[in-house]
Amino acid sequence: MGNGHIYVALGSNQGPRAEHLRSALHELEERGDIRVLRCSSLHETAPVGGPAGQRDYLNAVAELQTALSPRDLLARLQQIEQRHGRRRTVRNGPRTLDLDLLLYDDEVIDEPDLTVPHPRMWTRSFVMEPLREVCEPGWLDGLARATRAGRLRSEYFQLRQEQ
Ligand code: A4P
Ligand code: MG
């Protein structure tokens, strides 16, 4: 059913957190065009950024298989967030359900409303620890190197253009 090596981060720190994550996994599969191949364990993590006094998060990472394009997959993730009553008020504020597209095989997308690989994933243990449970380490490390090299190259060309 299309591409593998697609990884989505799940996070919740409001309401019944584990229930939000479990039902999101079912909702991903309900139209029959996405398969959840694997899901990490649930990690309880201290909130990073955002207002003080937030509850701890439950975070997980799922590996998906789908023929949906990255953009269509993002739209589906956002529909599911909305069903869980997600409200966007404060940046990094508490949320019932956050679904981020981390990786779509080795595709690099740099558009205003979609950046893949997710730009903040590499330094966040609440993403990397569950991701390492479901992802082949060699593949992930190769991608990390390529992403860093790609970023350095584009920064270099940008600098040259500005000179
Ligand atoms: N967007 C661009 N690229 C992507 C992508 N790859 N996946 C755009 C998902 N969305 C992407 O997202 C804001 C916009 O990002 C969207 O309109 C989409 O087009 P959002 O879900 O509305 O807002 P957000 O999640 O609050 O913003 P953001 O920037 O994704 O936040 P982060 O950086 O993901 O941080 N601490 C712990 N312990 N655990 C957490 O899960 N999460 C956050 C959110 C902060 N602290 C946390 C956790
Ligand atoms: Mg998000």
Image: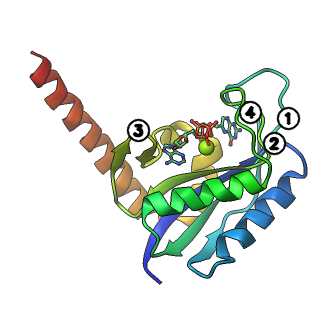
Q: Is mark 4 within 8 Å of ligand 1?
A: yes
Q: Which residue is mark 2?
A: 13
User: Tags 4 and 3 in contact by the CB under 8 Å rule?
Assistant: no
Q: Quadrant of ligand 2?
A: top right
Q: Which residue is mark 3?
A: 112
**Sequence-first tag of 4 and 1:** 4
Q: Which residue is mark 1?
A: 55
- Quick one: 90 or 123, which is closer to the camera? 90
User: Tags 2 and 1 in contact by the CB under 8 Å rule?
Assistant: yes
Within 10 Å of the Cα at label 1, are there few (<14), some (14-19), or many (20+) other Cα atoms? Answer: some
Of the residues tagged 3 and 2, which is closer to the observer?
3
Q: Provide the secondary structure element on which disc 1 rests.
A: loop
- CA gap between label 2 and label 1 equals 6 Å
Q: Amino acid at mark 2?
A: Asn
Residue at 70% in and 53% down: 81
Q: Is mark 2 within 8 Å of ligand 1?
A: yes
- The correct choice, above or below, for 76 with respect to 14 in the image is below
Of the residues tagged 2 and 4, which is closer to the observer?
2
Q: Amino acid at mark 1?
A: Arg
Q: Which residue is mark 4?
A: 47
